Amino acid sequence: MYRYDEFDAAFVAGRTAQFADQVKRRLSGELTEDQFRPLRLMNGLYLQLHAYMLRVAVPYGTLSSRQMRKLAHIARVYDRGYGHFTTRQNIQYNWPKLKDIPVILDELASVEMHAIQTSGNCIRNVTTDQFAGAAADEIIDPRPVAEILRQWSSLHPEFSYLPRKFKIAITGAPHDRAAIRFHDIGLQAAVNGAGEIGWEVWVGGGLGRTPMIAKLINSFVPNEHLLAYLESIMRVYNRYGRRDNKYKARIKILVHEEGLETIKGQVEAEFAEVRGGVLTLPSEEVDRISAYFALPDFAAQTLTKIDVAYESIVDPAYGRWLDNNINAHAQPGYASVTVSLKPVGGAPGDATDKQMEVVADLAEKYSYDELRVTHEQNLVLPHVALADLRAVYDALVAADLAEGNNNLITDMICCPGLDFCALANARSIPIAQEISRKFAEPARQKEIGELKIKISGCINACGHHHVGHIGILGVEKKGGELYQITLGGDATEHASVGKIIGPGFEAENVPGAIEKLVDFYIAQRQGADETFIQAYRRLGEAPFKEALYGTA
Amino acid sequence: MSKEILTGNELTSGATVYLSAGGTWVEGLHLARLFAKEEAAERDGALAATKATGRVISLEIEEVDVVDGAIVPKRLRERIRAAGPTAPLTLHGQAYDRQHLGEDGHVSI
Amino acid sequence: MGLPKLAPAQAAHDKLKALGILALNGMFDEMDALGVLRYAVSDVLPGDLAIVSSFGADSAVLLHMVAQVDASMPVYFLETGKHFAETLAYVETLKKQFGLLNVHAIHPDANDVKRFDPNGDLWETDPDSCCHIRKTEPLEPITEQYGGWVTGRKRYQTKERGVLPHFELTSDDRIKVNPLAYFSDADVVEYRQKHSLPEHPLYAKGYKSIGCAPCTSIVAEGEDPRAGRWRGLNKKECGIHYDFSGAIANPMTAAARHTLWKDGAFIADPFKEWAEGTNPSEARYVHVPLPEFLANRSEFLANPHPLGLLVSPGEKIEDVVDDLARFASIAIKFPAFSDGRGYSTARLLVERFKYAGEIRAVGDVLQDQIPHMRRCGFNALVVTHEPSRQALIENRLPEMALFYQPVGVTEVPLGTRPFLRRVS
């Protein structure tokens, strides 16, 4: 993992002191709320319905046990004993008080963490594949580049007041687990004809009220020119992105309205000016940063295969967990474990301070002190020996963290919704809870197989509903809540945006509607191997619509 | 009969507060001062005075009904703000309380 | 208003002096310069009065009067070492022709020059300090020797000098005598012609206000005569002038009036607001809006006066890249602090187009954005937001000293690795 040196520590300390001063000036009345708002937002502090909300960055979703314990400590001391892990691989606290924020930031700084640029119209926390550096299918570990991007984008003076927020996702694997095609910039590792590793650059993706799939603006940018290329995109966006309408201010609208070729021309012209300049990334620097992310010195394992079928007979719950929550590791004898934050009836992504402590202990003991946060709101122990899986599982069971539902129907993405969020139009968490209760039966979940439900409480789509195989969007209608259902979304390399299938449903009718769709899929599928999304693509929208609404 | 109330969040705690009949900002929705439609001038005056102090932020005018003597906001959002989140955290089904103000319990303007 | 009320405990002679000064200002006809001078020499400060002369374009008139009243009055000339050769020759001419008996040159301290201006180019980087070591410092010990001074200042000369009496009491209890206070440019010319006074050799060449050679340029017809001094340097007064109440101009009190922050102080802004409909060939000391400039480019380029450029968000600095050298100052507009387009404009100007002049931020300029602005190349700010002004004056901006990305031309790499890191 990356470790702060004196410079990083001084930088974060400087920023923390700066914000402490700004809080002081706000409390004294010197700063008005209008002046303070963008400053607090750039330090991750929102005002929500009931209280402030602090969003802490988990850079590219990587944590040590020490950091996770600090997150637990903050939850316990300054909040209400829990935190909410988000689709941006961050953690949010829902109840902090303004006067405590400087202290919380100091606490975070003591474990090399911060809340810098987790909000505001700047470059946000860079996100990546939760299995980065561990996945068997990976071309390159994207985290060294993600760390370099974190540094380059931190308090960038030119790009701190962009037209709108800006999100970058990066993945080193061909299978996209980071939804890079739905980010302002998506980076995917690529190999050119000479066998060199560089980056495919995708631009203009996003969700929100105008979902768009990113377009490929450059199929190979060498590592050494990546920063120069990104700075070129940022400059074009900063200068020409729309500022007259906040709903049209994201780069996706610029790319859409001007056309990819025009934007590409502007970016390439800018790149021609800055290429080879001060932003050229020396390979020694990449090597130096990469050294921080060197794989652990894995102990040799004699156990290199788990007999899941056998384990399922002995202990079905453990079998399900092995079946769903284990991801293939590049190192023989190891696996990456997904720790589900989606218990039946729970709030997706929430973890108590005690649960955080348990996961931290497990990371320290079984995962070379490493943890990941996934954009699907789960946690990951990236490097667990197969021989330790049972011990890890047992500890997770004791902490209510052993739901074997990864990628199944109850593994939903869900935003905080109207229970917490000042922007929401409808509640999300109660919908997720009811759906998970309806499909709680493990055999039923297994029968349905991979199915991603994503729920947002408003058009801003923090719950990624556009890219759910089944998406649920809460809207306000006549003072009440109504839920629209979309089908066919996909956040991976087979990116697609879901389509609204018909009139919306009252909250109490949503689980029943999902059940109709699921039953129809099971009846129609060509075999257990054909997933929901595959069946939808084969059959098209009409039969699903008919199944849901009837023929009349 | 539809009335209006003034609501916002207190600066230091972020807690939901309402302008009371006594001119202070308090936690209890039931203490909120009701403005009739023709009291728009007083309402706007109170709003401007509060804004000038900077101690209550995210100020809003909310429409409410008075049902059996109780103040009921028309918007679901406001009912949730008044009561706290409806969704429980965990398997244990415990709902959250609202955020509360600091020691003195009200915000004077 | 007027002179400050004096406390009763104050020494009697001081009081008399103060009241006397007040009365003196009513004694003379506005244009009776000789009468003022004669009375000062004979009655107010006999034997205790001297004059500092620049021997500039309009020095002859006052020196001619001095010679008539008292040819032995000490006349000090600040020999800064930076004068035009023509000026030095002119000193000799006037001395001889008027019969001045007591002309002294004051030289800067050689050690100061060696220490602060070893290459002789301090005027270029820090004109205030240059004036300080060459004028203010050397003059100070001389000033202390006299009870009063004769000056050639005139009301009309600059806007800051609209009010000027014949006699002033300075804060250190000295008297300043301004015989020419009410003289206009025409009066000076008339006096000079009437008495056939020798003209400064540079006057005919367009120099109307002459100081040290490096900081003086030609003033255009109709332009403020002192506009040629410190042109483009946002500096109007050298340290030896006094304000109306007699106090030496103090940058901290000046800060209360000025909104232009540059080189660590709020200073007078030579630039005025652009007015709609300004004739392109007559514009001077304004920031011309970029579209306006493009629409009348040839007229503006033919205009000999100092001009700035105003770049608003959405306007492309690339469109004027060939004409950047024409502008003494480029103002970049921030209509709201949240509109960050100006940062890109500034970086392009400094880093890509190598513009080395003044780049000022105008509009919604607040302390929390100023550090970003500086990093992007802004070297001047127009600030009206009071807390931000205080933060600047008290040097407590919410600033970071460490940076993660190379930006601008002044930040230096922190070691060779990691390569992104910079310090200010």
Image: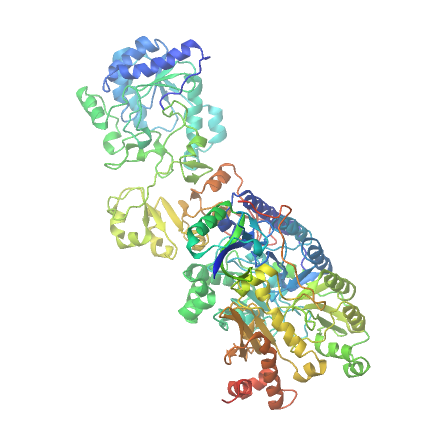
Direction front: furthest residue = B68
Tell me if I can see residue C83 in this picture: yes
Tell me if I can see residue A155 in this picture: no
Q: In the depicted view, which residue is nearer to us: C275 or B19?
A: B19
Quadrant of the frame with the C terminus of chain C: top right
Q: Is residue A398 left or right of residue A219?
A: right
Q: Which quadrant would residue C193 be assigned to in this image? A: top left
Q: Position of residue B100 (x, y in %)?
A: 63, 53
Q: Position of residue C191 (x, y in %)?
A: 20, 21
Q: Is residue A135 left or right of residue C146?
A: right
Direction left: furthest residue = C194
Q: Position of residue A193 (x, y in %)?
A: 55, 75
Q: In the depicted view, which residue is nearer to us: A379 or A61?
A: A379
Q: Is residue C105 left or right of residue A106?
A: left
Quadrant of the frame with the N terminus of chain C: top left
> Residue drawn 48% across and 63% down?
A233
Q: How is the image coloured?
A: rainbow
Q: How many numbered marks have been drawn onto this rendered protein structure?
A: 0
Q: Which quadrant would residue A258 be assigned to in this image? A: bottom left
Look at the picture and state if B5 lies above or below A267: above
Look at the picture and state if B4 lies above or below A473: above
Q: In the depicted view, which residue is nearer to us: A532 or C253?
A: A532
Q: Position of residue A66 (x, y in %)?
A: 73, 57
Look at the picture and state if C246 lies above or below A201: above
> Residue drawn 58% across and 81% down?
A513
